[in-house]
Amino acid sequence: MKVVVLGGGVIGLSSAYFLQEAGHQVTIIDQTDISNNCSYGNAGYVCPSHFIPLATPGIVKQGLKWMLNPESPFYVKPRLSISLIQWGLKFMQMATAQNVEKAAIPLKDYALLSQHWYEQWAKLPAFKFAYEHNGLLEIFQTEKVAEHSHHIVQRAHEIGLTDTKLLSQAELFALEPRHKLDALGAIHFKCDAHLYPNKLMKQLIEDLKSKGVQFCLNEEVTDFETSHGKLNAVITNKNKYTSDAVVLATGSWSRELVQKLGIKMPLMPGRGYSVTLENSPFQTDYPSVLIEGRVALTPMDGNKMRFGGTMEITTTKAPPQMNRVVGVLKAVKQFFPEFDIPTPSWEQVWYGYRPCSADGLPYLGRTKKWSNLVIATGHAMIGLSLGAGTGKLVAEIIDEKPTSIDISFYQPERFNH
């Protein structure tokens, strides 16, 4: 079967991997050269701990408070946009305790499936992407978050993540002894792992090319050739590609693309930033999320340290803002007072766009309108974490096999009414 995969991020590449393995002829199309997309600059987490979706009670109220702070970790760029307004209204509607409760087990199962496949890849000679299963620390500074952390640990145990532990200040300091740390305690999610995304992406590309997967880069999809409820061909600004099946994994550019196919899919780009230091004196022993600062720190690949964060709901054309990077580094210093990280130049800053759905859950599955189209996008900040698992699920969907997990929660047309 000829399968055209639209998008060369970790979701598209993982889909191509499992489709090629299943015997399909795979072509990947991307509008860029896929050397620096959102799959490269993220924190590298493979994290079953992230079972709480982006759309949570209180996030909207908190977001409004942050609107006037140019260094805040969550920001919605005000603009007159119908798609932004529609997304925002649905986001507020979906940000309920009931929806958060319902999402926990599906998200956890999805992440564990993905982790399984990363662990399988890490055993193969072609893949050496600095995979480490050391767990993740969620570090907090305030009594309010300490109280909330008790509930998170309890919920983690309820959904089967029983190796999750609430650490006292002394226990936290014992795990991170190298630097002074200003914190009350942490949650230790022993279920989590991390990897170096830059190596993973490069090795996936090399592996796929060696197996005959065709890469059509710097080509923009302009239209589709359709008949009888099927996509017969993908048309780009350079070529036409006939298809038996199409996988749409175009990240933050997906909403505009599915509109061409008559599908409504509320989705907004959420820009994030990161800075990676090599041979840095500012090293931690564990990957960590600084809760109040909403910043992620990851030791990577032996000698690297990555600092990342912010969720800036904006357009893919808006210029980046250095004050967001300054905000990330300030938050790091509030937790690690010895980390005097100088403001980097733009050449040292990475930024990319995470595709954010209106309920914080991915869009994954077939569509009713087009029988041979599979959508795989909307993974927000956990696209890398869910990448390998998504690829396996996409291949199962294409081959009409029972899926490894229940994907009914992720139906891509769930807002089409």
Image (spheres, rainbow, N blue to C red):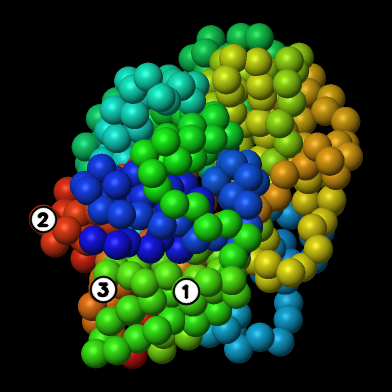
Q: Residues within 10 Å of mark 2 (few under 14, many from 20)?
A: few
Q: What whole-number distance in Å separates the C-alpha atoms at marks 2 and 3?
A: 17 Å
Say which amino acid is labelled 2.
Pro
Residue at the image point whose x is 49% and y is 40% from the top: 205
Q: Quadrant of the N terminus?
A: bottom left
Q: Nearer the viewer, residue 114 or 2?
A: 2
| Horizontal arrangement in the rendering, residue 382 relative to residue 43 (left or right) | left
- Amino acid type assigned to the residue bearing label 1 in the image: Lys
The percent position of residue 312, horizontal first and vertical second, equals: 67, 61
Look at mark 1 in the image and give the residue it sits on.
240
Numbered tag placed on residue 372 in the rendering: 3
Based on the displayed image, in which of its 4 quarters is residue 96 positioned? bottom left
On the rendered structure, is 319 left or right of 13? right
Residue 46 visible, this angle: no
First of labels 2, 3 by sequence position: 3
Judged from the image, the secondary structure of the residue bearing numbered disc 1 is: strand
Q: Quadrant of residue 154?
A: top left
Q: Which residue is mark 2?
A: 402
* Badge 2 vs badge 3, beta-carbon distance below 8 Å: no
What is the distance, in whole Å, between disc 1 and disc 3 at their CAs?
A: 17 Å
Q: Of 351 and 258, which appears nearest the observer?
A: 258
